[in-house]
Image (tube, rainbow, N blue to C red):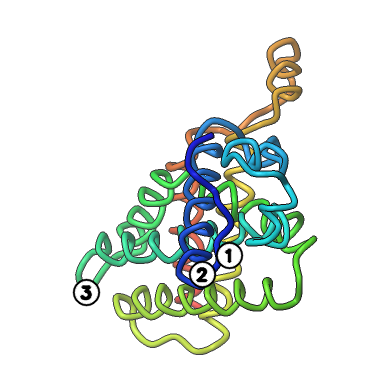
Amino acid sequence: MDTDFRRARTDEQRAVRRGDILTLTRRLLAEHRVADVSLNEIARRVGLAKSNVLRYFGSREAILLVLLSTDYEEWVSHVLAALPSTPATDDALAGALASTLADQPLLCELLTAAPTVLEHNVTPDEVRGFKLSIQGSMERLVDGIEGRLGDWNERQRGQFLGGLHAFITHTWGLANPSPALVAAMAVEPRIVGLPGGFGQVLQDALATLLAGVRAA
């Protein structure tokens, strides 16, 4: 047991318990992929029965959505600090985005799992809170990018965000194949993996995306 999880009786105590669960889940995710971390594993790590974990979060997915929202907000702060001054080239902006993402593997993995896994098995209130939080971070990111490139209209802002997340999740998936695929690639040379490292492939894709958005 990592800590004393006596039942919380006040709002402050409940907030502390939630924070402890998030911290210990993050440590677990440093050792295992998202798909391999179950609610039972989280409960064992924090020293609680699964039913007691559910007093603080409605599901495993609800825990992971909070971590994703937090990590996305922190990443936006990092990338805005790393962005070059105005004016900036597409390559320089793409490099700042890609390099900071390469330093956030858990964020990339959680983003990849969000639409197909994490946004399921949660309550409407949980997913609403997640969406409002992460959309606020997205707006802050786009405002910062736009400030280096000139005014964008709503269509351009949407194109950038849609392309950004599509490139992150697709590239991350290719860069981190399943164990079965790794084994298959080892014996079958005709199976092609990602043609380069995650950071460089993502940077090239985002530079193309930025050029396209600016031309739209």
Q: Amino acid at mark 3?
A: Thr
The residue sitting at the left extreme is: 85
Question: Do residues under tags 1 and 2 come within 8 Å of each other at their CB atoms?
Answer: yes
Between residue 209 and residue 68, name the one nearer to us: 68
Q: Crowdedness of circle 3 by 10 Å Cα count: few (<14), some, many (20+)?
A: few
The residue where tag 3 is placed is 86
Q: Residue at x 47, y 48 (%)?
A: 23
Quadrant for residue 116, please give it.
Answer: bottom right
Quadrant for residue 193, please give it.
Answer: top right
Between residue 179 and residue 119, name the one nearer to us: 119
Report the disc number at residue 212.
Answer: 2
Q: Amino acid at mark 1?
A: Gly
Question: Do residues under tags 2 and 3 come within 8 Å of each other at their CB atoms?
Answer: no
The residue where tag 1 is placed is 163
Q: Residue at x 30, y 67 (%)?
A: 80
Mark with earlier residue (1, 2): 1
**Disc 3 and disc 1: Cα gap in Å?**
22 Å
Of labels 1 and 2, the one closer to you: 1
Between residue 147 and residue 64, name the one nearer to us: 64
**Disc 2 and disc 3: Cα gap in Å?**
19 Å
Q: Crowdedness of circle 2 by 10 Å Cα count: few (<14), some, many (20+)?
A: few
Q: Seen in the image, is 126 located left or right of residue 1?
A: right
Q: Residue at x 25, y 64 (%)?
A: 81
Query: At which x and y percent is residue 132?
Result: 57, 79
Quadrant for residue 83, please give it.
Answer: bottom left
Query: At which x and y percent is residue 29?
Result: 55, 39
What SS does tag 1 mark? helix
